[in-house]
Image: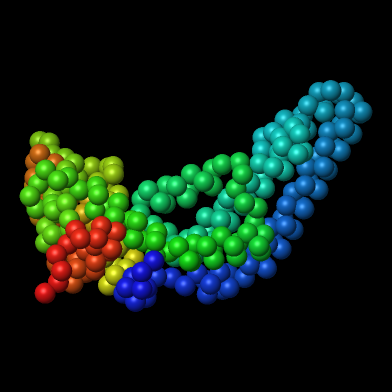
Amino acid sequence: MSELTLTESEVLTDNTNVICSTSIERIVSGRDAALAQIEALIQQLGDISALTGTIGGGKSNEWGVRQYRYDCWLMEKPETAMKAITQNIDRNIWKDLMNKSGMLALMDAQARDEWYNSLEKDDIPAINEENILGTFKQLHLNKGEVFERGVINVFKGLSWDYKSNSPYRFGRKIIVNGLVKHNRWGFGLNWGWQRDRLADLERMLMLLDGKPVPDNRADVTRRLGDHINENRYSNRYEDEMFVMKYFQKGTAHITFKRSELVDKLNDIIARHYPGALPTKQ
């Protein structure tokens, strides 16, 4: 990570402070206590199943309790149940820690997908003090690299078929395909990777500007979608970062309103592709 990015992106969250504020000790002890109680409950249900099998009703009564265990997601084998329950609890804790850390704001759509997909695997790290501190220390050290990779991914996703899209830099305006759709009822916003990239682009500009990043309920794609729904036959949208004009063939012309922030994006591109941009005069 370059010194320039550290200086310009002071808004990048200091994960150490966030992790301390969430009280790792409280999280770990609470998680361990909950799992101990769940394990005891599973054992108790197993004992009840055995007991009901010895009274009137025989196997039918034993099966009734086993069916209750299944309906409650407490599966037949205690070790299988504990593994699944532990992973589910740990998965949710990791998600919550990541949301509080601010790291998701630095990630582009691809990086966020990779993070969430990693949590669906069977070998997710157990929630303990060592794993939490180690994971977020590494994320904190790599946050500049993660942010810059997002900038490069958005840049590389542009189509070079348009003269406005320079293969060397972000220009005053970029053109993207497939952001909108059009039919007899007017315009609509497409779901898909172009929508994700537009949200990523806004996130990067907001971070470089030192401003809070809007969540997905208020980001540019949500605001653009609301605008289109309310103005089906308009083809123009504007906010503090962009002026957009979109057309029936699905293309959108996006003009940047903050040239100094675009310069910062181009500084990042120049560091990854030396010689791509001319020397500043």
Q: Is residue 172 visible?
A: yes
Q: Nearer the viewer, residue 178 or 228?
A: 178
Position of the N terminus by quadrant: bottom left
Tell me: residue 108, above or below residue 16. above
Measuring from the top left, give residue 91's x and y in whole percent.
Answer: 58, 50
Left or right: 211 with respect to 260? right
Residue at image coords 80%, 40%: 45
Residue at image coords 39%, 61%: 145
Tell me: residue 118, above or below residue 223. above
Q: Return the residue found at the far right.
A: 54
The quarter of the displayed image where residue 94 is located:
bottom right
Residue at image coords 77%, 53%: 36
Tell me: residue 250, above or below residue 130. above
Q: Is residue 235 visible?
A: no
Left or right: 129 with respect to 189? right
Position of the C terminus by quadrant: bottom left
Left or right: 34 with respect to 234? right
Q: Nearer the viewer, residue 16 or 71?
A: 16
Measuring from the top left, give residue 210's x and y in whole percent.
Answer: 31, 74
